[in-house]
Amino acid sequence: MSAESRVTTPAEDAFCSIERTLGIVGERWTLLILREALTNGATRFDEFTEVLGIAPNILATRLKTLVESGVLEKREYRVEGSRARMSYHPTEAGTQLLVVLGALGQWGDDHVPPARGVTATREAAGTPLRVGFVDDPSVLKPVDEVRFVRTPSHPRYDAA
């Protein structure tokens, strides 16, 4: 990961990358804010509050965390006759969370019926896409063939 795209997290000392990631995106509303930013192009505070119905103080807190973590970046804009305001745009690291949103949506479609709302599609062909585990030759693997293993930096790493 380049220095520019390095994400910081409140759980930096955690050995588990899932735990560190949840330190950024695990709060209530955060993934819905990202859904709106990444799939619907929302960038302005009022767009998020209108679409999500989120309280302004909670939205402000979540946006601050996402900006401080390098998931979103702030940009100034001004509507004629108004004061300058900030808009919020996904960084490269933020855009990569589309895969997480796709996996959550896919799981919801499969296990929390009815399947409705949005689905990921291939832009050029419009064909539906699925999220999955793929090995080096780009072969989709069933989840019963997937195993998470500890790396050498993990405190309970067992080389055996």
Image: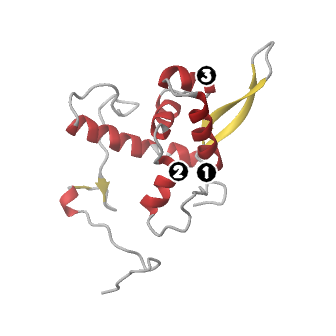
Is 96 on the left-hand or right-hand side of 119?
A: right
Q: Nearer the viewer, residue 23 or 125?
A: 23
Residue 104 vs 135, above or below: the answer is above
Disc 2: which residue: 24
Residue 101 percent location from the top left of the image: 40, 41
Q: Amino acid at mark 3?
A: Asp
Q: Earlier in the sequence, mark 1 or mark 3?
A: 3
Q: Amino acid at mark 1?
A: Ser
* Rendered residue at 51%/28% (across/down): 54
Tell me the CA gap for discs 3 and 2: 22 Å
* Rendered residue at 27%/66% (across/down): 147
Tell me the CA gap for discs 1 and 3: 22 Å
Q: Earlier in the sequence, mark 3 or mark 2?
A: 2
Q: How many marks?
A: 3
Say which element carries label 2. Answer: helix
Tell me the CA gap for discs 2 and 1: 7 Å
Q: Earlier in the sequence, mark 2 or mark 1?
A: 2
Is 58 on the left-hand or right-hand side of 152?
A: right
Q: Nearer the viewer, residue 89 or 136?
A: 89
Q: Nearer the viewer, residue 108 or 29?
A: 29
Instruction: For the residues labelled 2 and 1, say whether their Cβ atoms are less than 8 Å apart.
Output: yes
Crowding near the residue tagged with mark 2, few <14, some 14–19, many ≥20 C-alpha atoms within 10 Å: many
Disc 1: which residue: 69
Is 84 on the left-hand or right-hand side of 61?
A: right
* Rendered residue at 45%/62% (across/down): 17
Which mark is drawn over residue 46?
A: 3
Q: Nearer the viewer, residue 147 or 125?
A: 147
Q: Amino acid at mark 2?
A: Ile
Say which element carries label 3. Answer: helix
